[in-house]
């Protein structure tokens, strides 16, 4: 398959990225097509859709061999389920799927048509293989069951972010970083209240600790 585009986001690495697309709508992304695919004709009519599907590569997930079972972090990291019953990045084919909101299509750009999206759960520079419109009349299933995710999807932390530290972030990034932290970036199998974690987001490194259901930001350092 050919890489048709790459996305620009505020995540330089995968630590801290929300576990699903759409969980943090404040996250902004910019999709820039590869030169071969920079044709305004290729996106004609896309602006009429509010959401799009992205098919992309787990470019930061490297594993020599695939395993038929994986350990979802939200199940504590000690329970195995089938790889095809998860969205784990460690798959036979390293393909990801995300539904994101299409904010706008910018045709008159130096880089050709550029797509601005929100709610993306992708690392900066992630290769994109395809883009398709989201069709609510067939893609939305209100009666769908959700398996083990019904136990884990509501997990959120209470974030304490001192105002003087939050102010180091540009105002348009403040809500996003708070909501990213609420999703609990830690590996589920690590529960050390004394450990200080670092999360890189939008040009800053956020240092934090977690005690029970409470996340406390200790420092914000410009990268």
Image (tube, rainbow, N blue to C red):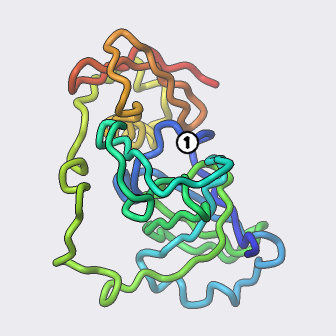
Coordinates of residue 56 in the picture (x, y in percent) = 60, 65
Identify which residue is drawn at 16% across, 78% down. 143
Q: Is residue 131 above or below residue 41?
A: above
Which residue has dot 1 on it?
Answer: 14
Left or right of 162, for residue 143: left
Identify which residue is drawn at 40% across, 35% down. 185
* Residue at the farthest top position: 194
Viewer-proximal residue among 100 and 75: 75
Image quarter where the C terminus lies is top right
Left or right of 63, for residue 117: left
Q: Is residue 210 above or below residue 141?
A: above
Identify which residue is drawn at 37% across, 59% down. 22
Q: Residues within 10 Å of mark 1 (few under 14, many from 20)?
A: some
Residue 38, by quadrant, is bottom right
Coordinates of residue 68 in the picture (x, y in percent) = 48, 57
Coordinates of residue 192 in the picture (x, y in percent) = 34, 15
Q: Name the element at disc 1.
A: loop
Left or right of 222, for residue 5: right
Q: Is residue 11 above or below residue 213?
A: below
Coordinates of residue 158 in the picture (x, y in percent) = 22, 30
* Residue at the farthest right position: 36
Q: Is residue 79 above or below residue 29?
A: above
Viewer-proximal residue among 175 and 58: 58
């Amino acid at each position: 398959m050919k890489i048709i585009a790459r996305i620009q986001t505020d995540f330089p690495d995968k630590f801290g990225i929300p576990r699903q697309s759409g969980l943090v709508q404040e996250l902004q992304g910019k999709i820039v097509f590869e030169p071969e695919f920079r044709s305004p004709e290729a996106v004609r009519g896309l602006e009429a859709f509010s959401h799009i599907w992205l098919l992309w590569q787990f470019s930061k997930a490297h594993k020599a061999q695939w395993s038929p079972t994986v350990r979802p972090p939200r199940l504590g990291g000690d329970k195995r389920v089938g790889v095809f019953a998860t969205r784990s990045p460690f798959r036979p084919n390293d393909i990801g799927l995300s539904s994101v909101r299409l904010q706008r299509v910018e045709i008159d750009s130096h880089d050709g048509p550029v797509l601005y999206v929100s709610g993306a759960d992708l690392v900066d520079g992630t290769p994109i293989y395809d883009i398709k419109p989201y069709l609510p009349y067939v893609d939305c299933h209100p009666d769908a069951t959700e398996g083990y995710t019904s136990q884990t999807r509501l997990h959120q932390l209470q974030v304490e972010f001192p105002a003087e530290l939050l102010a180091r972030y540009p105002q348009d990034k403040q809500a996003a970083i708070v909501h990213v932290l609420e999703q609990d970036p830690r590996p589920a199998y690590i529960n050390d209240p004394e450990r200080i974690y670092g999360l890189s987001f939008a040009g800053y490194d956020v240092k934090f600790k977690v005690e029970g259901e409470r996340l406390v930001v200790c420092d914000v350092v410009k990268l």
